[in-house]
Image (cartoon, helix red, strand yellow):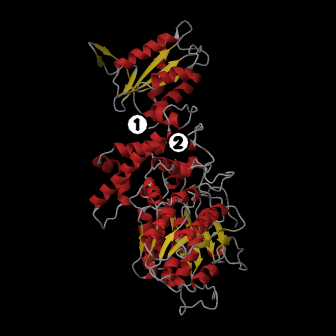
Amino acid sequence: MSTSSKHTSMPIQVFCNSIPESYSKKRKCKKISLEYRPGQQSKQNVKFPLNDFIESVYYLPNRILDLLEIATYIFSGDRSVHRGNREAVEYHAWSRSFEYFISVRDPDFWNREDVKSSLSQAIEWMTGDKSYRFNFISGHETGKAHLFDNECHSMEVKGNPRVLLFSGGLDSLSGLIDLLETTDDPIWPISHDSGNPSPRKTQRKLIEAIDLLYPGRVNHRIFTCHLHDVRAPEESQRTRAFLYCSMALGMAVALKQKNFYVFENGVTALNFPKRAGMINARASRTAHPKTLTLLKNTFALILDDNFEIKKPYAFKTKTDVINVLKDYKRIDLMNSSVSCSKTFKPLGIATHCGECSQCIDRRFAAYASQTNKEDEGGIYAFDFIEEPIVEGETKTGITDYLRQAHNFLSFNLDQFYYEMIDHLADAIDINSDQSEQVEKLYSLCHRHGHSIQTAAHNMIKPLVKYPVGSLQTIVYNTDFSRPPVFPLANQIASEFCKFLYRACSKVQPENENDLNAKLDGYLTGHKEKFQREHPFLSFATARTVPDLSNAHLDLLIEAKYIRGSTSPSVATSGIAEDLTKYPDETLKLFVVYDPYNGITNPEVFKSDFEKKRYCIIEII
């Protein structure tokens, strides 16, 4: 069957290496055939020139050839089935169930329960999918790739070759320069050609520039794997880490090495969820410590020997990574690297969208390290510093990013441990000193928070007037460093506004008490319980009572009614008076009902209060 762009909750069966779909009698499932070899029973729909790979290294053992094909088909199957729309991510609808049927050269090994279990665990963890099941069938062979494709021939190995994953992004670029500067060994950067010409061009241009700086040191290899003659319905590519690492393993085996390098900064690798509900795709685990540990364990089974995936940047921030280039005086290469996750979008002459999480992280790190001049020059299609940020994914991404950094900066070690304990359990190595690892992760996150605080300060010039809705608006007026009670207060204000339009479409509230009654009635059905005119709060010698309050949330709500005969100045005075009575640390939500548009400039009315005091003004 052809690939589909529609999300499916049905189990997905994937038949590879010309295993017929009739091999399985299961009916209630989606069936897909994948084949990378031309001229087979199944039509070729995957581009993977395995023979070119073999020819570049002379010879690879059967298990490694099987692994490369398995990784190719898992990656291609992942990209063939759409996960669902972005909204579905919030409701746990991203997970899929896969069952693979793959003919292999060494079925006895691949059908071992420990091997299948190790493979399934690694893929399920890195993707967030429900399940991966594997059926390995005997009878597969591809013949010799060339005259010297046998174990008697192997690559000539000089020195201590270093194999590393090289995407062309900042982290892998800094890692490559790091190895070139600190060793005299030959370096083998491994890149993946996913069919998108932009990353391939970036990788080649960078390597050409590095070759001039370090002649004869770099042996770059680009390995192709992507869907053939069809646009991939799914762009998340969560299985790419398995494919990429399998390619690196193949090269390491050819070079007789028992390790390869993954240069990914610790904050990106850990990718702690920036808010509740960020699961699966929204919290990628591509280079997560647990992902690499599970892959390492699988590779050790395949090799029947110990294997290591080295992570030199596990405790570096993105700012630290950029500083590597600064320290070695290679910062001029920065502008040629590409970190964007959405290069498949039409970006014109730009190389970065400027809106994805990778672009946001890169720009903040550049400003924190004061290398923003080297990082700009028109490479971003959208400039969130100078341009208004509309409501949606970009604004949410920046707001979440800033809030998380603020939280990291505000935590002490104990707070960090208790707030992050669920995520730390997956991030630390149980065979090492766990207390020491937690302290290192705390230091990493704290330094990240400090970097982002510094970057925000460097990005926004005090005397410059930025457009409404730009980054300055987020940092100064609304979301940055605000606690979770703010989104709740904004939600209440927005939903009560809709409620009031429906409830009062024909008859206006009689007075402010009636408005309060309607607000109280609306909140009766809310999951957070509010009390009307309770509790008493002391102010000077008097006692004052908010219209509605929730002590647990530290939120007070006051309603103001501007009727036809009421001057807006009366509401202004009332709000100002209330602000002096209520505690500074408690958020105050003022719902101002203004049916006759007495407030002629609502934005000025709101901002004058909100920028000075801890409150939200909602004008209806």
Residue 60 position, x and y percent, is 54, 84
Name the spot of residue 390 as percent of width and height, x first: 59, 37
Q: Tag 1: Cα neighbours inside 10 Å, few (<14), some, or many (≥20)?
A: few
- Residue visible at 41% across and 34% down in the picture: 485
Q: Residue furthest top?
A: 565
Query: Circle 1 — which element?
Result: loop
Query: Which residue is labeled 1 in the image?
Result: 483
Q: Please state, as top left, top right, bottom left or bottom right, where the N terminus lies in the image.
A: bottom right
Q: Amino acid at mark 1?
A: Pro
* Quadrant (top left, top right, bottom left, bottom right) of the C terminus: top right
The correct choice, above or below, for 588 with respect to 284 in the image is: above
Q: 475 left or right of 198?
A: left
Residue 412 visible in the snapshot:
yes
Q: CA distance from mark 2 to mark 1?
A: 15 Å
Q: Secondary structure at mark 2?
A: helix
User: Residue 40 at x, y = what percent?
Assistant: 71, 80
Give me the disc on residue 396.
Answer: 2
**Residue placed most toward the observer, 550 or 469:** 469
Looking at the image, residue 87 lies above or below residue 574: below
First along the sequence among labels 2 and 1: 2
Residue 25 visible in the snapshot = no
Q: Amino acid at mark 2?
A: Thr
Q: Sort mark 2 into few (<14), some (14-19) or many (20+) by Cα contacts within 10 Å.
A: some
Specify the quadrant of the image occupied by residue 226: bottom right
Q: Nearer the viewer, residue 50 or 93?
A: 50
Judge whether 419 appears above or below 605 on screen.
Answer: below
Q: Please state which of residues 31 and 344 is positioned toward the viewer in this rendering.
A: 344
In the picture, measured across the screen, residue 450 lies left or right of residue 374, that is: left
